[in-house]
Amino acid sequence: MATAIKNARTLVAAATSNAAAGTTRGTLQLSTAMGGILTFKMTNGATGPTVQCSANVLVAHNASLPTAASAGTDWKTVYSVGNGTTANTVGEWNYTVGPAVGNLEVEFTGNTAQAVTVEAFLTELTSVG
């Protein structure tokens, strides 16, 4: 039976605070990976944000990892979801990262008036042998 080699990778550490009107990003270069499963989470506080926090999953086609940024010249959005404005709402999502993805970014942005707790992790598949 083949053995799969998997590695846990952190894009945004657990319990990171995305400040009101702030943006939190995490990036990974996946040139040696065969894809993986991305999980990400947003948790509103006891007072929900005035405008929801959104999570954007972006990829870049560059040979090397570009500087973290919003969608534009290098980064392209492939998935986006919001967590609403209700107090104490916990939202968890996953996204399958295909083997063709070379660079990955998760961006949390948009919440106003209140901070939102965020995190993003990837289990990457590096080989099957």
Image (cartoon, rainbow, N blue to C red):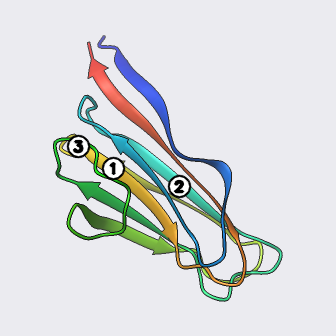
Q: Is residue 19 above or below residue 15?
A: below
On the image, numbered disc 2 is attached to which residue? 40
Q: Are marks 2 and 3 in contact (CB under 8 Å)?
A: no
Using the rendered view, name the quadrant where residue 56 is placed.
bottom left
Describe residue 118's horizontal placement relative to residue 56 as left or right: right
Residue 102's mark? 3
Determine the CA span between mark 2 and mark 1: 13 Å
x, y (%) of residue 127? 28, 21
Q: Residue at x 29, y 13 (%)?
A: 2
Q: Is residue 56 above or below residue 39?
A: below
Q: Specify the amino acid type for callout 1.
A: Leu
Using the rendered view, name the quadrant where residue 30 is placed.
top left
Residue 125's mark? none
Determine the CA span between mark 2 and mark 3: 19 Å
Determine the CA span between mark 3 and mark 1: 7 Å
Q: Secondary structure at mark 1?
A: strand
Describe residue 80's horizontal placement relative to residue 87 as left or right: left
Q: Secondary structure at mark 2?
A: strand
Q: Specify the amino acid type for callout 2.
A: Phe
- Say which quadrant the N terminus sits in: top left
Describe residue 112's horizontal placement relative to residue 56 as left or right: right
Q: Residue at x 25, y 28 (%)?
A: 32
On the image, numbered disc 1 is attached to which residue? 104
Of 15 and 82, the residue lying toward us: 15
